[in-house]
């Protein structure tokens, strides 16, 4: 049922276009924004506009950045001979939070999904192959453990194997705090395959 205010309805409709935001969540957000001071709403709007104006893709790794090439690609402390391939820019953020990886990244911009019309030409695969001609020793395939992510990893492994690089795949298994009893068979199988010696 539409509200008597067209502005409220337009705002709700706009927010429902965001991932994970249904109509009820959008309504809650709109009514929250109506309660906060105008300055906070303007600051939010300015931040969103700045996001679209300032943020772009790095021409080397295709991560998000405000400067090109990005700070990760130009950092001399990074190991340039190791490239970790991920699906999206938010995967870089997740890996960087661990503090474990010191190499460079390559963001594909998605995963293979023939049903959705996403093939290798829709991803940054050609650009990855071109980067690997510049003295790279290892490629870590860190695509998501979904059907699309697995298909992408297999496709890339087959494509890159003839280049003579060391290929690796991130390990998958049981999350910390998880119970074996409630873990699905595929995750358990992968955990056993990826076991390490103590």
Image (cartoon, rainbow, N blue to C red):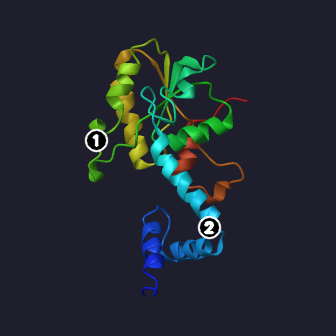
Of helix, strand and loop, which one carries label 2? helix
Q: Position of residue 117 (x, y in %)?
A: 26, 49
Q: Residue at x 43, y 67 (%)?
A: 14
Q: Position of residue 82 (x, y in %)?
A: 53, 20
Q: Residue at x 51, y 30 (%)?
A: 67
Closer to the camera in the image, 108 or 164: 108
Please tell me whether residue 142 is drawn above or below residue 52 in the rendered image: above
Sequence order check, earlier mark of 1 and 2: 2
Closer to the camera in the image, 130 or 171: 130
For disc 1, the marked residue is 119
Please tell me whether residue 73 is drawn above or below residue 31 in the rendered image: above
Residues at badges 1 and 2 in contact (C-beta under 8 Å)? no
Closer to the camera in the image, 143 or 69: 69
Of circles 1 and 2, the one toward us is 2
What quarter of the picture does the C terminus occupy? top right
Please tell me whether residue 104 is drawn above or below residue 113 in the rendered image: above
Quadrant assignment, res 190: top right
Of helix, strand and loop, which one carries label 1? loop
Q: Which mark is residue 38?
A: 2
Q: Position of residue 62 (x, y in %)?
A: 44, 33
User: Badge 1: how crowded within 10 Å, few (<14), some, or many (20+)?
Assistant: some
Q: Which mark is residue 159?
A: none
Q: Residue at x 57, y 36 (%)?
A: 171
Q: Is residue 122 left or right of residue 71?
A: left
Q: Is residue 151 left or right of residue 186?
A: left
Q: Position of residue 77 (x, y in %)?
A: 64, 18
Tell me how far mark 1 sits from mark 2, CA to CA.
45 Å
Farthest front residue? 39
């Amino acid at each position: 049922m539409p509200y008597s205010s067209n502005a409220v309805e337009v705002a709700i409709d706009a927010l429902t276009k965001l991932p994970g935001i249904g109509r009820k969540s959008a309504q809650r957000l709109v009514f929250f924004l109506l309660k906060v001071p105008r300055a906070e709403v303007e600051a939010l709007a300015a931040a969103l506009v700045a996001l679209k104006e300032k943020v772009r893709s790095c021409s080397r790794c295709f991560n998000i950045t405000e400067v090109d090439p990005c700070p990760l690609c130009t950092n001399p402390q990074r190991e340039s001979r190791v490239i970790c391939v991920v699906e999206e820019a938010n995967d870089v953020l997740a890996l960087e939070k661990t503090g474990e990886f010191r190499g460079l990244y390559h963001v594909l911009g998605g995963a293979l999904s023939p049903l959705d019309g996403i093939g290798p030409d829709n991803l940054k695969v050609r650009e990855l192959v071109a980067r690997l001609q510049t003295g790279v020793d290892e490629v870590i395939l860190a695509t998501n453990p979904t059907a699309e992510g697995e298909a992408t990893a297999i496709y890339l492994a087959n494509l890159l194997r003839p280049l003579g690089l060391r290929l690796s795949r991130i390990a998958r298994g049981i999350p910390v705090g998880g119970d074996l009893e409630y873990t699905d068979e595929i995750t358990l199988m992968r955990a056993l395959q990826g076991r390490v010696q103590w």
